[in-house]
Amino acid sequence: MSDNKIRINKIDAYVYENKGKRNERKRHVYIEGDLTVKTFNNLQYNLDIAIPEPMPFIYELDDIRGKAKGKLFVDGETPPLVTGDLEITNMRYEVNFAEEDQGSPIMLLLTGENSWDLDLNILMLANYRIKNDDINAEFAGEIKLERTDGVYKFAGEMEILRGDGYLFDKTFRLDPGGYVIFQGDDQFNPILDLTGYTRLPAPKDNLENNNSGEQLKLGIHITGTLEEPIINVTEDSDFDSNENIIPLIVANYSGNATEVSSSFEHRLNDLISTRVSQIGTKQLGVETFEINPHYGGGNYDPRLTTVTLGTYLYKGIYVYGESNFSLNRNEVGFEYRIYKGLVLQGSKDEDDFRHLSLKFRL
């Protein structure tokens, strides 16, 4: 310390990852710079913070946890401005979405009486998962987070990599490539561009006129904003009208399209499959565990029910496998997001064809 300036040559802080286990190791944060004491409760900050390896973090009040690395700079008088770049290497947000009169847990986590200002670039290459009663999906994206005088602004986009959305007793498989887009204003109301599909069992007397053979396909395209979503039927659905979408989802009936089966057995099978899939991902410690019932000839056929299992391996390589209980349909593959905009994918399908693709995105 010289006069009112404190010089920090190095602070080495660390937390234990997998404490008490064979793969226990320390994750470090390094801090250097200086602090100038203006008054008893006012400091001038000039600090560099380095997190070279993914460091675990957890929010104890809710099920929010993950790992992050990057470099930050703290500058200015109390409360200072924090700038820099962070990469979220993995994160789990397993909290139900807030009700209309509630606050978001993640916003409560970032808010304090004397909150520091923020200007952060946050990168998520993959492995950012939101899992609750409404959705179980993995995202990637890049967000610019700003906070000035306690007011937040988000700019950027989140891309859906894989996952499911839940509406009543139905599970919609979300199409990869859907987006949630933040416009940079101070209202948490992003633009939506999402597509999801589900299959509904057709009654036996309609099978001959059903183009899908044994099941009716319902696809929905969600646009608009989070507060005012717009739902339309996709062009490749077996239902050609936007009318009565809600009765169709809730009661399996549409007044201007083919009536679908609404038997208790079908609805119970779908509910059980969805619930088992949700429990399985948590208990097995994997990213994806899905059970999809199949209805042959209008009846539930357990032999054709498919199971999908997927998880991350070393350095963010995602591998998956899909098969039905009769073992006559199998597919395996992998995905490696090398960096933002560059993805390597490979798979072997049920016909034993091998596929390898390299995707670029500017």
Image (cartoon, rainbow, N blue to C red):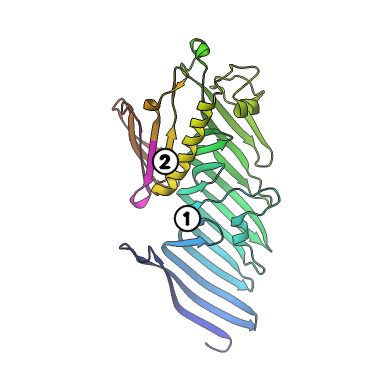
| Residue 209 x/y as whole percent | 52, 10
| Residue 191 among magenta residues | no
| Residue 6 x/y as whole percent | 53, 83
| Residue 343 x/y as whole percent | 40, 42
Q: Mark 2 points at which residue?
A: 289
Q: Which image quadrant is residue 153 in?
A: bottom right
Observer able to see residue 162: no
**Mark 2 and mark 1: Cα distance apart in space:** 23 Å
Q: Where 315 sits versus 289, above or below? A: below
Choose mark 2 or mark 1, whichever is in front.
2
Q: What element carries label 2?
A: strand
Q: Name the residue under label 1.
A: 88
Residue at coordinates 43% horizontally, 45% vertically from top-left?
281
Residue range highlighted in magenta? 308-324
| Residue 310 among magenta residues | yes
**Three-letter code for the amino acid on which mark 1 is drawn:** Ile
- Return the residue nearer the eye: 151 or 269: 269
